[in-house]
Image (tube, coloured by chain):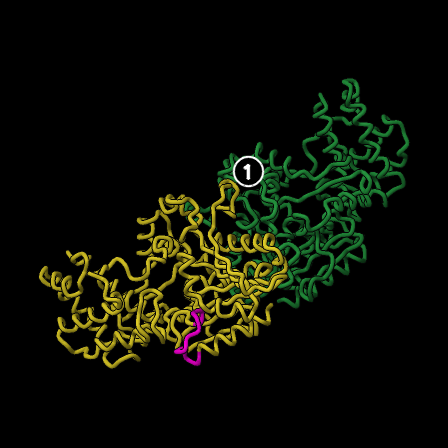
Chain colours: A green, B yellow
Amino acid sequence: QIDHFGFDENRTFQQRYLVADQNWKKDNGPILFYTGNEGDITWFCNNTGFMWDVAEELNAMLVFAEHRYYGESLPFGNESFSDSKHLNYLTSEQALADFAVLVEYLKMTIAGARHSPVIAIGGSYGGMLAAWFRMKYPHVVVGALAASAPIWQFGDLVPCGTFFSIVTNDFKKSGTGCSESIRNSWDAINHLSSTDTGLQWLSNTFHLCSPLKNLQDAAVLKNWLSETWVNLAMVNYPYKADFLQPLPAWPIQEVCKFLKDPSLSEKLLLQNVFQAVNLYYNYTGEAPCLDVSQTATKSLGEMGWYYQACTEMVMPLCTDGVHDMFEPQKWDFDALSEECYRMWGVRPRLSWILSMYGGKNISSHSNIIFSNGGLDPWSAGGVTQNITNSLVAVVIPDGAHHLDLRSRNPLDPKSVQQARALEICLMKQWI
Amino acid sequence: QIDHFGFDENRTFQQRYLVADQNWKKDNGPILFYTGNEGDITWFCNNTGFMWDVAEELNAMLVFAEHRYYGESLPFGNESFSDSKHLNYLTSEQALADFAVLVEYLKMTIAGARHSPVIAIGGSYGGMLAAWFRMKYPHVVVGALAASAPIWQFGDLVPCGTFFSIVTNDFKKSGTGCSESIRNSWDAINHLSSTDTGLQWLSNTFHLCSPLKNLQDAAVLKNWLSETWVNLAMVNYPYKADFLQPLPAWPIQEVCKFLKDPSLSEKLLLQNVFQAVNLYYNYTGEAPCLDVSQTATKSLGEMGWYYQACTEMVMPLCTDGVHDMFEPQKWDFDALSEECYRMWGVRPRLSWILSMYGGKNISSHSNIIFSNGGLDPWSAGGVTQNITNSLVAVVIPDGAHHLDLRSRNPLDPKSVQQARALEICLMKQWI
């Protein structure tokens, strides 16, 4: 159903989902249901090894459901992103309704699944969806594991600056002079980008695919660098991995090896910054040049997420350059609103998500695990304290973005091993 | 917000609500929030004396919120019912979102209400909304009193025939020969309506405003009679009242005084049936003729409800003429679907309401009172057994449709007095 909440649009669409039942105990063995987020479901499926690891122990069937408007689950095919009319059905509520209907369909059609308890599992936005799925459809899922889900990164529930100060701390801890080098880099870029020769030098130094032409391009460069540091904080895993990009173990430590001396002259400093980001974008050594329009895997659906961030998923973020290593930037809702209107013809609604999902006032719900990594900037908006006996916060001090959802690894820190053990223990209580 | 669940339609509309705060204890005294149903809110306000009666005891503010598309709360003014595009936002989900946003607005804007606990109260469809409001927005309301709310009159959760067998029992208990007289009346009408003189006789005998012309009109007459018996069962109150129509105490007993002998000849039988329905439609003696297109107060929004019954609110009902006094009629979803498509250009969705609100699987929710009257046909789809310690069923054996929500009355049976006492006691525990 393209529109669950209205009857004028009565068409349906094909939603993709993946099923793995080799470990499933027929006749009501549990189902672990991945609430797909903003990307191709096969990619999430391949990066959620935790579910594969526990399938045997829980005798569970795995289902990975793709989120509408991502991957191959496009309600209007190639037209899906053409205008605000076609995008109108891209909301978390519609996605949750898809999941509810899909679970019911699977339980009706798979022999022996009729009474299978279903647990929602998701990470990041998918973690929010897992938590919200349990909140709104407790008759469909007995519980939810919401990994690195910043369900409080909305409205004024948390300070807007914490996110970037966590990123900064990750760099501060990973090498002397590292965060200071990055903090100093912005002025260096600003200074150089004030002249044409400076812009050209920057383009060459950063091996950019398309050269910078003006101050606006320089702003794009800075934005791209910021996102790079944020992404590094998200994927600062203890072993070689390929989530957003192929990277070595503890990539921020590797990056910081280039950023030891913040007092260098601006050109030397920026050459080091290039070395640092080049490690992120070109760890395989295959990139002929760096593209400032791309910061992560193409498996993520940037268009769809941009629209969602322009409607429901308005997450206030800000920097001050003091508690963080970024250029100061206030949270500016009006500017966002204008940009969204220009881009998509829609206006974001700041408080709707709070009205819908309750903000901090969620204690009447049950059976949700909120896990968060201490290294992960998204933990700023996460639930890191138990709310009740059955709304449990699991903190992984040396974990990055939903490390707990990844496959077991010999290099896993003790904290994530314990977190997973607790998660499994709680899930067993639900089923 | 006309559309809470999409961002393409960004217009807003004016929702009407009534506030009574003379008994309210400022600084966080409770708010009793009436979740308006399919009609003019002033009419519900005047027929929900229970809230007025308890306001003092609970130091409560009363709020009566009008349901979108009813009364004066028309999203598109006179255009609201013009086509399926304009009707697209008439759903229970949108109505609940209206209520959530309204409660938050009131708590923000009324001095001293910031931390007021809010209890949802509603009857009939409004009772369903009250229960669903607590289920979906537990952060907004601490509990709900769902009076005569047939939340299980959907899908195959309950047998479709119980509704009409309860109506029949009400008549059976209210006078010898009463239900049999009605059961025999259908054949009499069928026989007479096969000739023009018979149709004319029926038109005269029933004092119809517009005479019957053919078999189709005769079917309308029978349908109107059926609805009349159903309505009488709903408003079979122990005292003189004016809910759907002005009526004496225990109106079915009064009606049955005309229907003692089912073995009368068909014309005599139908003359008695006329006397019976005339009591319902013309208790005041002011009606010059009877109008088969109207069965209840005009305060109910028939258009809107017709649309809702054609979309989400699909409640299967059926008769067999054996366990009930009606003409046998199977539940026919396909016929309904065709009629709805012809009428509104929409198709009903049979299972959506179950997916959305959980059907019988609601035990993980809390703080909901389901009250039902034993005389009320809608109790067929109601919750009449406790589900958990905090999902409590209150049964009022000699109560009709949400009798408990009406003002205290000296003629109230003991059962409704006790029911109200229990309801108040439980509500006090929530606040």
Among the 4 quarters of the image, the one containing residue B335? bottom left
Residue A235 visible in the picture: no
Q: Residue at x 75, y 41 (%)?
A: A230
Q: Residue A4: give x, y in percent of width and height.
A: 47, 50
- Would residue B202 be found to the left or right of residue B370 on screen? left
Q: Nearer the viewer, residue A385 or A348?
A: A348
Q: Eyeballing the image, is A213 above or below A351?
A: above
- Would residue A5 be found to the left or right of residue B314 on screen? right
Within 10 Å of the Cα at label 1, are there few (<14), some (14-19), or many (20+) other Cα atoms? many
Q: Residue A293: give x, y in percent of width and height.
A: 68, 31
Q: Is residue B387 magenta?
A: no
Q: Residue at x 40, y 57 (%)?
A: B38
- Tell me the magenta residue range: B404-415
Q: Nearer the viewer, residue A118 or B69?
A: B69
Q: Residue B258: give x, y in percent of width and height.
A: 21, 76
Residue A228 visible in the picture: yes
- The C terminus of chain B: image quadrant: bottom right
What residue is shown with label 1? A346
- Would residue B352 be found to the left or right of residue A52 on screen? left
Q: Residue at x 60, y 56 (%)?
A: A33
Q: Eyeballing the image, is B215 above or below A236?
A: below
Q: Residue A9: give x, y in percent of width and height.
A: 43, 45
